[in-house]
Image: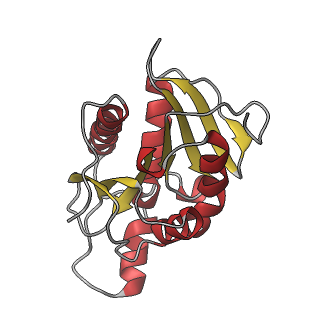
């Protein structure tokens, strides 16, 4: 029995990273939220409930399919673990069945990479998750947002937290491809391989 009433165990926990609030809604840093929302709609998981300092959708990917929980932490990116850690514990999800969906500066726009574990590439959301999970050995779907041609932190920050440079259609297509990738992992059609 879960410690949190009304939270049955899940086979998979999908954590979409982003920042709460309208200011960040349409920024590359929030692409994890966009994918989480797309999956909740695709799997017809219904309205999210506020729990674990986040917005949580629960259900099955299809009748008889895996039990999934889709979480959007509302703690701000840098403290995502404070939401995802307790959620993972209550849902009784093994670490290799946690899939974190996040933006990746070091990949060109539209590039998608999947891996289990590995480095954190300076990503504060991933650092918080590692701290709360006690290990970096969780799955990641890394979504390339591209990097500006400078290391100036103010320009990089403006790129990550500013509006998309790409068209709405390009962003929608990227989100759909990332959602397809997560779905393949959850349904066992794509393997989360350890990072080399």
| Apparent side of residue 70 relative to residue 55 in the rendered image (left or right) | left
> How far across and down, in percent of the image, does residue 98 sit?
46, 47
| Residue positioned 61% across, 23% down in the render | 46
Q: Please state, as top left, top right, bottom left or bottom right, where the N terminus lies in the image.
A: top right
Q: Quadrant of residue 74?
A: bottom right
Camera sees residue 137? yes
> Which one is in front, 173 or 101?
101
Residue 21 visible in image? no
In this picture, residue 141 sits left or right of residue 14: left
Q: Look at the image and tell me in which quarter the C terminus lies.
A: bottom left
Residue 97 percent location from the top left of the image = 43, 44
Taking the spot 25% from the left edge, 62% from the top edge, the residue there is 195
Residue for point 65% across, 28% down: 47
Residue for point 49% across, 55% down:
17
Numbered-mark total? 0
Residue closer to the observer: 85 or 159: 85
Q: Position of residue 133 (x, y in %)?
A: 55, 62
State whether residue 91 is above or below residue 78.
Answer: above
Left-right relation of 108 to 117 = left
Whether residue 191 is situated above or below residue 101 in the rendered picture: above
- Give the residue at the far front of this rendering: 1
């Amino acid at each position: 029995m879960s410690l949190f009433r009304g939270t049955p165990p899940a086979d998979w926990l999908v954590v979409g990273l982003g920042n709460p609030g309208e200011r960040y809604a349409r920024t590359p840093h929030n692409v994890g939220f966009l994918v989480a929302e797309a999956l909740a709609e695709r799997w017809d998981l219904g309205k999210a409930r506020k729990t674990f300092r986040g917005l949580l959708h629960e259900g099955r990917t299809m009748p008889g399919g895996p039990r999934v929980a889709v979480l959007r932490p509302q703690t701000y990116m840098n403290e995502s673990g404070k939401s995802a850690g307790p959620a993972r514990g209550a849902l009784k999800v093994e670490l290799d069945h946690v899939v974190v969906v996040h933006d990746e500066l070091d990949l060109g726009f539209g590039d998608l990479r999947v891996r289990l574990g590995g480095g954190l590439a300076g990503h504060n959301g991933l650092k918080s998750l590692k701290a709360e999970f006690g290990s970096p050995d969780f799955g990641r779907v890394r979504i390339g947002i591209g990097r500006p041609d400078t290391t100036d932190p103010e320009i990089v920050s403006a790129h990550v937290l500013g509006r998309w440079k790409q068209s709405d259609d390009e962003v929608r297509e990227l989100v759909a491809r990332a959602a397809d990738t997560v779905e393949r992992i959850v349904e066992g059609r794509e393997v989360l391989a350890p990072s080399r």
